[in-house]
Structures are given as structure tokens and as C-alpha cells.
């Protein structure tokens, strides 16, 4: 039985059998609808309550997470009780040790998996494009992670993974670029994400459509459809009256007008003061985080920069990022890695899952994962020794 890869984010859960050159077979909201008894109405009346197991990247409601994974693994993937397989989870940067252990405990004690592994989303995104050195800017629903991954000792630690990554990408006509290992340097988190941009978009739409009540779920869809980036800050400031209005009919029949608002979503990532934050934009955040690394590694990191997360697919975002990067004060400008043509479309949306699928092809066949025997002998803490 092939291993399953699960990438559970704050907004979407991606899951499927580990097939590295295909998009995940399941993409669904990371939400659960629970039926709870309404004490105020009496007579045993039941109301629906929406629960989000994952908040800003981390699991907050483990009961809801268990219910969600029950649906994913048994109803969708096709596992059968008593015949569960191996599973690889992605995780955000800076996941607390206690949460890693709780996930391993859930998998072995509730789902009876035969093997378990987890790895960081930002690292896996680089694997998806054949890199084991570089930077990722991972714009999630509830956070932005800046990660630097330096090659160092992978050939000693895990030669099979390097060979697998080589084999997969060479067979797809792309040469791997580095040899080495997973070594984090100066990674950091920026506590804004897609959910904050949605709220900003809602506020701006309300200003220009004051008589219309727009549900936040509709705003989310409008953001995905209309949000884009101006070429630069001057172009954004010059939009004003030159922005062509778009009329959009909401599901309830109300009509709204969208003008400059569509550009403010992307602009906030480069000018966080729009969100009320006294901080620098994402290009400056990336460059300053790399400045904490020894100078001889700057080129290796910055010239292999990857943008990932749904927001990175916004129209004009990559071009704006590269333009800002070219103007940065860094001696070596960040340069974006282009996704291989043979990989699925919208790679930025699925890169962590696809990197996980590549990694799963190594850790499970090579017995580098946490086995049931490992777990029974050592307990949940074994995850820190075997999962890198």
C-alpha cells in the first residue's frame, strides 16, 4: 500500500496517495460541521456549529482534527479499519514539540498507522522543485514563513533521499542543483496571512459599497477572483480614478463595484502599514533574515527563492516580488525558482504536498520513518529523533 500524504492548513486540507508528479486527489476546507444541542431552544433542538481544527497553521482542536482525518482517510482515501497504512504529514515552521508528539500519538493510538513521518512545509516546497538549498516565502492562510535551507550533510545523513530527489527530477529532465542536508538558518514567521488579507479586502469593499452586506465567504471568493498586484508602489498610488470598475453580482443578487480595492490585497504584503503593522514588506523580511547567515551562503540561498501558498498565485504577484527584489539593497538579489513544466499546474498551492510525496518515496521504503515498534518502545517523543 502506497503512503498517504496530508497537508492540513488553516484554510485547506490536501491529501492523497504519494504520487509526486500529480496534484493531491483531495483538496477540501479544513473545517468540520458539528451538530450540537441548543440549550436555549430546548426540546432537544440541534444547531450546526462550524469548527476549525487548524488555526494559523497549528492544530487547536484535536477532537475536530480526529473527525476530519477519519473522513479523509477512511471515507476518501479508502483505508479500512485494521488495514491502515503509512502516513506523512506536513507541518509549519516552529511547530511546538508537544504538538508533534500529539499528532504522532493520534496516528498510532487512534488510527493504528503502520508508519509515521512529518516534515516542515517550507522544506518540502523546495523539494518539489528539486532544491535542497534555498529560501521559501510561504504565504499561508494565517501566517507567512520565511525559511532558509542550507546544504550541509545530507549525503552522510540520508544519501537515499538525495539519490531519490536526483532520480525523480533527472527523469523529468531537470538537473538537481545542490547536495547537502536540511539545516535551518535564521528562519522567521510573519504573523499575517490570507485571512488578514481577506478581512482587509472586506473592509475596503464596504467603504465603496456601503449599502451592501457581504458575507466573509463571498469576500474570500472575490479575493481569489479579483485580487492582483500593481507593478510597483508608484503604480499603486497612481491608480485612483484610472482604475476600471468591475461590477459583480453576489450569490444573493446584490451588485457590488470593485475598483482599486483589488490591488490593496497584494500591496499590503509589500507595505504592511496598510494592515496597521509597523514592519517591512516581504522582500525586505526575506533579505534581512538571510543576512543572519554567513555571507558565503547568501548566493546559494537567495538565488533559489520559492514563493508558495495560494496567495502566491495572485495575478502579478511574482512579477512584483521579483521587481522589488531587483531593487533591494542586498548585494545578491533574490531570484525566483521557476516550477518545472512537468509538475502540476498551480505548484505554489500544492508544493508542500508534492514535496511530501517525493519524501515519502524515500523515508518509508528505506525504513527511516517512525514504525509502530519505535512508537511502542519509546513513545511520542521518538518523532523528534526520526523526523527531520
Image (spheres, rainbow, N blue to C red):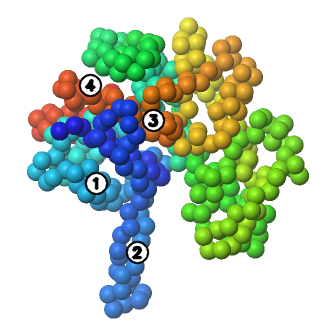
Do labels 2 and 4 touch, CB within 8 Å? no
Q: Is residue 352 visible?
A: yes
Alpha carbon separation for disc pair 2 and 3: 36 Å
Give the number of the disc on residue 362: 4
Q: Of label 4 and label 3, which has the lower sequence position? A: 3
> Which residue carries the number 3 mark?
344
Quarter in which the C terminus is drawn: top left
Q: Of label 3 and label 1, which has the lower sequence position? A: 1
Left or right of residue 175, residue 379 in this image: left
Give the number of the disc on residue 76: 1
Alpha carbon separation for disc pair 4 and 3: 21 Å
Q: Of label 2 and label 1, which has the lower sequence position? A: 2
> Which residue carries the number 2 mark?
48
Query: Which is in the foreground here, disc 1 or disc 4?
Result: 1
Left or right of residue 375, residue 221 in this image: right
At x 80%, y 57%, the residue is 245
Query: Which is in the foreground here, disc 3 or disc 1?
Result: 3
Alpha carbon separation for disc pair 1 and 4: 24 Å
Do labels 2 and 1 touch, CB within 8 Å? no
At x 72%, y 27%, the residue is 323
Alpha carbon separation for disc pair 3 and 1: 21 Å
Q: Of label 2 and label 4, which has the lower sequence position? A: 2
Alpha carbon separation for disc pair 2 and 1: 23 Å
**Looking at the rendering, which quadrant does residue 166 occupy?**
top left
Q: Of label 1 and label 4, which has the lower sequence position? A: 1
For mark 4, give the secondary structure: helix
Query: Which is in the foreground here, disc 4 or disc 3?
Result: 3
Amino acid at each position: 500500500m502506497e503512503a498517504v500524504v496530508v497537508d492540513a492548513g488553516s484554510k485547506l486540507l490536501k491529501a492523497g496517495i504519494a504520487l509526486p508528479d500529480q496534484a493531491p486527489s483531495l483538496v477540501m476546507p479544513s473545517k468540520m460541521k458539528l451538530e450540537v444541542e441548543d440549550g436555549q431552544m430546548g426540546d432537544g433542538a440541534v444547531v450546526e456549529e462550524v469548527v476549525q481544527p487548524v488555526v494559523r497553521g497549528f492544530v487547536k482542536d484535536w477532537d475536530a482534527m480526529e473527525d476530519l482525518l477519519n473522513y479523509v482517510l477512511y471515507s476518501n482515501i479508502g483505508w479500512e479499519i485494521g488495514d491502515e497504512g503509512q502516513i506523512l504529514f506536513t507541518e509549519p515552521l516552529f511547530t511546538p514539540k508537544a504538538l508533534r508528539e500529539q499528532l504522532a500519538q493520534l496516528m498510532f493510538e487512534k488510527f493504528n498507522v503502520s508508519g509515521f513521518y512529518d516534515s516542515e512545509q517550507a522544506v518540502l516546497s523546495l523539494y518539489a522543485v528539486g532544491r535542497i538549498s534555498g529560501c521559501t516565502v510561504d504565504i499561508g492562510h494565517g501566517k507567512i514563513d520565511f525559511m532558509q535551507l542550507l546544504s550541509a550533510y545530507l549525503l552522510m545523513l540520508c544519501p537515499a533521499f538525495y539519490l531519490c530527489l536526483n532520480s525523480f527530477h533527472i527523469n523529468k529532465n531537470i538537473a538537481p542543483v545542490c547536495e547537502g542536508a536540511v539545516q535551518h538558518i535564521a528562519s522567521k514567521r510573519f504573523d499575517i496571512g490570507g485571512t488578514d488579507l481577506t478581512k482587509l479586502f472586506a473592509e475596503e469593499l464596504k467603504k465603496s459599497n456601503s449599502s451592501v452586506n457581504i458575507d466573509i465567504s463571498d469576500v474570500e471568493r472575490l479575493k481569489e477572483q479579483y485580487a492582483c498586484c500593481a507593478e510597483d508602489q508608484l503604480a499603486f498610488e497612481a491608480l485612483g480614478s484610472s482604475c476600471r470598475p468591475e461590477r459583480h453580482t453576489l450569490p444573493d443578487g446584490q451588485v457590488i463595484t470593485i475598483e482599486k480595492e483589488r490591488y490593496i490585497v497584494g500591496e499590503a504584503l509589500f507595505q504592511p502599514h496598510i494592515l496597521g503593522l509597523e514592519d517591512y514588506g516581504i522582500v525586505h523580511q526575506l533579505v534581512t533574515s538571510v543576512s543572519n547567515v554567513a555571507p558565503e551562503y547568501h548566493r546559494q540561498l537567495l538565488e533559489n527563492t520559492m514563493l508558495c501558498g495560494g496567495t502566491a498565485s495572485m495575478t502579478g504577484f511574482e512579477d512584483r516580488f521579483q521587481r522589488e527584489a531587483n531593487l533591494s539593497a542586498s548585494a545578491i538579489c533574490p531570484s525566483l525558482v521557476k516550477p518545472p513544466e512537468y509538475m502540476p499546474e498551480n505548484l505554489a498551492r500544492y508544493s508542500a504536498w508534492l514535496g511530501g510525496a517525493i519524501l515519502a518515496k524515500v523515508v518509508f521504503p528505506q525504513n527511516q520513518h517512525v514504525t509502530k515498534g519505535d512508537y511502542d518502545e519509546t513513545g511520542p517523543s521518538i518523532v523528534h529523533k526520526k523526523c527531520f
